[in-house]
Image (cartoon, grey):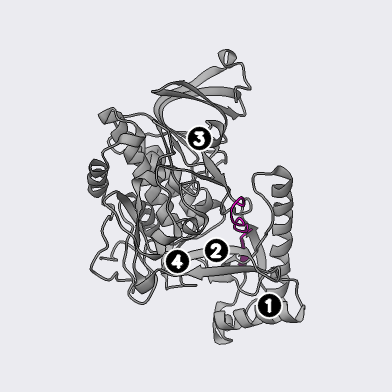
């Protein structure tokens, strides 16, 4: 874009690898890139804490396990370190197969902020919070200048390798790498403001019918028009904190998260819907009579904006045919979960499952922007079609993307190869050393306990 006089901007840092965005993908990318501690890594994050969606709006990791009655654990390696750290303080429990998405690892998101802090600082990664990427300049094949802004002004960060884990593919956008804008070919998935409630009498709720009753009450409210709910179904589940629940129920459609007017309207609408739900739950659902909202997500949850065109593009057919290849760098068993606007205007979720509880592999090339030499993508901006993206965006998978991208960047420096011509088998070997699962295990996972470390597979 070249909107700045670059010569007048001071250099904040020079680094081997810069990671743009400190969500679950970006944090894992930084940890993986720093694993041998031979290369310098900078991680920038626009909020005052790391974690992205994992700490801003959700409290459950999905994707570690396959759905169905015989769950298998298919994500491991560095992602386990995060869950292990939460387990040490009693801040997780395993939640059985819910809404077809498989066993969830429910955690305390406030504790997770400290876990991310600790692991990042212990790794030696240089962390810059409240820091935003605003422009990109290509200085050479082996150096990129990222222009960032924070409270002290505009600065340069010079990097040999770049991992775009911004969610919105900000680096790829500013660096003129190709991408698809969500909504151009198929409607973009809806946005969601999550909220948490305290003072729920969970035993009374369960005795009255629990989730079955909640689903019935929501459908009745929509059909009868007693409460202006945006959808007939939604998730409200028990939290680590006693007598608290977390939700994924709000649905905001037909707005684009990259347009500031739309995003502002979405934030306002999301909060409005949250308190409509509070009123509905207090009036209609046993156990919620004294419950109140105690927190909203830090921002509205955005499912998709820009999806980069990579050297390979994951497709719906890849997912539903359980396709696997020698270039796979992680596994996914999640169904396609498409949050969208229904034919009658109401918000709905459309599901499509991998037959037989199988899994598919995700090739390395989905993390390599087409035509790039020193860049990778990780997280929800990776290379996938709308449908495939709706399956492969669970946080265990985005952590796996970060693990693969960070390891690839490290390997790229050590072999002097670009992102597009890396030896994928060598990368797979390095991922295996970290404990990543690249083949489907034969053994069913033991999810009978509420912890993690003793969950042997």
| Sooner in the amino-acid sequence: mark 1 or mark 2 | 1
Q: Which image quarter: residue 260?
A: top right
Q: Nearer the viewer, mark 3 or mark 2?
A: 3
**Disc 4: which residue:** 335
Q: Which residue was labeled with disc 3?
A: 177
Q: Nearer the viewer, mark 1 or mark 2?
A: 2
Q: Which of the two discs, 3 and 2, labels the residue nearer the N terminus?
A: 3
> Which numbered disc, 3 or 1, marks the residue closer to the eye?
3
Which circle's residue, 4 or 3, is located before the other in the chain? Answer: 3
Q: Nearer the viewer, mark 1 or mark 4?
A: 4
Q: State the residue at coordinates (34%, 60%).
A: 323
Q: Nearer the viewer, residue 271 or 258?
A: 258
Query: How much space separates mark 2 and mark 4, taking CA atoms?
Result: 9 Å
Q: Which residue is mark 1?
A: 289
Q: Which mark is residue 338?
A: 2
Query: In the displayed image of the protein, which residue is found farthest to the bottom?
Result: 208
Judged by its main secondary structure, the magenta piece is loop
Query: Measuring 40% from the left and 56% from the top, which residue is drawn there?
Result: 86
Q: Secondary structure at mark 1?
A: loop
Q: CA distance from mark 1 to mark 2?
A: 32 Å
């Amino acid at each position: 874009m070249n909107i700045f006089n670059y010569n007048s901007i001071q250099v904040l840092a020079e680094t081997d690898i810069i990671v743009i965005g400190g969500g679950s993908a970006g944090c894992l990318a930084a940890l993986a890139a720093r694993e041998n501690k031979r290369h310098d890594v900078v991680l920038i994050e626009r909020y005052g804490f790391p974690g992205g969606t994992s700490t801003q709006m959700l409290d459950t990791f999905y994707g570690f396990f396959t759905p169905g009655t015989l769950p298998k654990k298919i994500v491991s390696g560095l992602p386990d370190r995060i869950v292990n750290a939460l387990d040490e303080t009693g801040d997780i429990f395993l939640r059985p197969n819910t809404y077809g998405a498989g066993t969830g690892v429910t955690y305390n998101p406030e504790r997770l902020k400290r876990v991310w802090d600790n692991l990042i600082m212990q790794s030696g990664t240089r962390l810059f919070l409240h820091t935003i990427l605003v422009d990109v300049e290509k200085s050479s094949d082996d150096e990129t200048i990222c222009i960032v802004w924070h409270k002290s002004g505009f600065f340069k960060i010079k990097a040999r390798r770049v991992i775009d884990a911004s969610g919105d593919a900000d680096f790829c956008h500013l660096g003129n790498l190709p991408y698809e804008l969500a909504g151009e070919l198929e409607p973009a998935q809806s946005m969601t403001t999550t909220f948490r409630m305290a003072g729920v009498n969970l035993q009374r709720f369960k005795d009255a019918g629990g989730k079955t009753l909640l689903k019935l009450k929501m459908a009745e409210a929509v059909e009868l028009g007693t409460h202006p709910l945006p959808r007939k179904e939604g998730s409200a589940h028990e939290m680590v904190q006693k007598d608290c629940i977390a939700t994924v129920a709000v649905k905001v459609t037909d707005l684009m998260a990259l347009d500031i007017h739309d995003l502002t309207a979405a934030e306002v609408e999301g909060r409005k819907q949250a308190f409509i739900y509070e009123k509905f739950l207090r009036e209609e659902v046993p156990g919620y009579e004294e419950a109140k909202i105690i927190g909203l997500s830090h921002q509205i949850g955005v499912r998709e904006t820009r999806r980069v065109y990579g050297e390979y593009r994951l497709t719906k057919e890849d997912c539903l045919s359980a396709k696997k290849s020698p270039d796979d760098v992680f596994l996914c068993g999640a169904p396609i979960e498409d949050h969208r606007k229904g034919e009658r205007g109401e918000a709905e979720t459309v599901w499509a499952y991998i037959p037989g509880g199988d899994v598919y592999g995700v090739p390395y090339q989905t993390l390599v922007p087409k035509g790039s030499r020193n860049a990778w993508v990780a997280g929800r901006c990776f290379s996938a079609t709308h449908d495939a993206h709706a399956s492969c965006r669970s946080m265990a998978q985005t952590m796996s993307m970060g693990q693969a991208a960070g390891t690839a960047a490290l390997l790229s420096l050590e072999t002097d190869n670009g992102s597009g011509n890396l030896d994928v088998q060598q990368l797979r070997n390095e991922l295996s050393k970290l404990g990543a699962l690249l083949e489907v295990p034969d053994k069913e996972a033991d999810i009978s306990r509420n912890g993690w470390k003793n969950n042997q597979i």
